[in-house]
Image (spheres, rainbow, N blue to C red):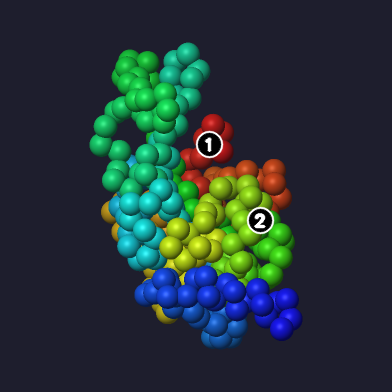
Amino acid sequence: MKRRDFIKSTAVFVSGAAVSTSALVMLDPQEVLAENPELRWGFLVDTLKCVGCGMCVKACKLENDIPYDANVTRTWVERYVMTRDGEVFKDCPKGARDGYTSKLIDENASGMKLVSDKDITQAFFVPKLCNHCELPACVQVCPVGATYGTKDGVVLIDRTWCIGCGYCIMACPYGVRFFHPVVHTADKCTLCYHRISNGGNTACAQACPFGARKLANLRDHKDPVTKIIMTQRVGVLRPEYGTKPQCYYIGLNEEVR
């Protein structure tokens, strides 16, 4: 048996029976692109509209079979609080799955902190997810080709090939990847590829009650979301890494990393 065959068969054995439901709906990217040659998926996050309710995080977990109580998530919402003396506090308890219902800031081992309202100069929420980069570092480091980019712009993981080495998790400068505690492979946002390839929306965008998350076809200049990206002041996370993220942000502060 060749090494590649051994790796693949081992990976199948490891992930085996635990794999189930919608997260495993596999689509052929070539077939999807053939039907839509003028397609390049992108995403827009409007931080000015996000209220930190966590509905997006909850919807993503349920849609993609991510263990609900496990401390892993394909998308999350960070809270930033800035004060008059220049301090910046950030927390993200449970990925904000349950929303921010308290003013207490979770500082992990240091406990909870309450910042007085009179000392706060700015406070806001920032949803995060895979940036589906045009030059994804995760794809470059995968030794078995399990991580790959589709021609319509989505970075995916083939669980049957992933050997769980973790190289992609370490290589991602955005920290969007994690080790799935059930199937024991790398995992991340797929942009709900099983939905969007069939004309649907991502679960997080559909669940957002304020329209803070929106899917775009970047090759369609008539797409209303693409128009926003093309004409308004938008930013991306960590452009210095040169990965060309395709998740764009409105209202992105420089304190956000």
Specify whether residue 196 is in view.
no
Could you say which quadrant of the image residue 22 lies in? bottom left
Amino acid carrying label 2: it is Tyr
Name the image quarter holding residue 235: top right
Identify which residue, 133 or 3, lies in the foreground: 3
| Along the viewing direction, whichever of 140 and 211 lies nearer the viewer | 140
Residue indicated by mark 1: 256
Asked if 37 appears above or below 113 in the picture, the reply is below
- Quarter of the image with the N terminus is bottom right
- In the displayed structure, 34 sits above or below 131; it is below
Give the mark, 1 or 2, whose residue is nearer the N terminus: 2
> Is there any visible trace of residue 108 in the rendered image?
yes
x and y percent of residue 121 in the render?
41, 21
Point out the image quarter for the C terminus.
Answer: top right
Q: Is residue 257 above or below residue 178?
A: above
Q: Position of residue 58 (x, y in %)?
A: 32, 55
- 97 sits to left or right of 3: left
Residue lying farthest to the front in this orientation:
1
Where disc 1 sits, the SS reads: loop
Q: Position of residue 53 (x, y in %)?
A: 29, 45
Q: Badges 1 and 2: C-beta atoms under 8 Å apart?
A: no
The type of residue carrying mark 1 is: Val
Compared across the picture, whether 176 is left or right of 242 comes to left
Residue 52, given in percent of the width and then of the height, sits at 33, 42
Q: Residue at x 41, y 48 (%)?
A: 71
Residue where numbered disc 2 is placed: 167
The residue nearer to you, when weighing 210 against 160, is 160
Which quadrant of the structure image shows residue 160? bottom right
At x 56% / y 33%, what residue is drawn?
A: 254
